[in-house]
Amino acid sequence: MAKSDLDRKFIRVRDKNQITLPTDLVSALAIQVGDFLEAAQMADGSIQLRPTRLVTVGTPAAEREEALAKEDIRKGRFGTYESADDLVDALKKRRKKVAATAVKAMAR
């Protein structure tokens, strides 16, 4: 049985489609009140939730994010890819690495 199968949590959908995330998951992902989660329906019928940030163009938050992106570029923290498939493969590898890190953090 895979480690992720052992860490399953059950969440009940309440009135107005509200859910409560398990405390250990919220802590492991550093989710705070007011944060946004991106919800995606996967091809297999599962739902994936990912922490995300929303910013509006021209706001101080957007300017900070742009400055961070420029800093990443300046420091060489970016990649180039020969094809869209190569990019997708790299993103899948990164997603697995991030998920493994979250599972380890939840196990603590």
Image (tube, grey):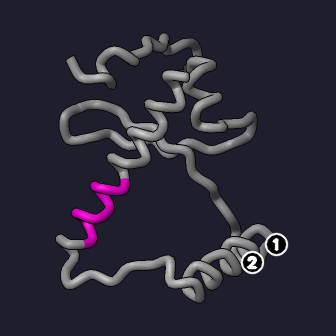
Residue pointed to by mark 1? 60
The location of residue 24, given as percent across then percent down, is 59, 21
Specify the quadrant of the image occupied by residue 48: top left
Query: Looking at the image, can residue 52 be seen?
Result: yes
Identify the residue shown where x is 52% and y is 25%: 106
Q: Which residue is mark 2?
A: 63
Give neighbour class at mark 1: few <14, some 14-19, many 20+ (Cα, 10 Å): few
Does the magenta segment cover residue 16?
no
The reply to whether residue 16 is visible in this rendering is no
**Identity, as a three-letter code, of the amino acid under mark 1:** Pro
Q: Residues within 10 Å of mark 2 (few under 14, many from 20)?
A: some
Say if 53 sits above or below 76 in the image.
Answer: above
Label 1 close to label 2 by CB (< 8 Å): yes
Q: What residue range appears in magenta?
A: 87-94
Vertical placement of 53 versus 22: above or below? below
Q: Residue shown at 79%/73% (left/top)?
A: 59
Residue drawn at 19 percent across, 80 percent down: 83
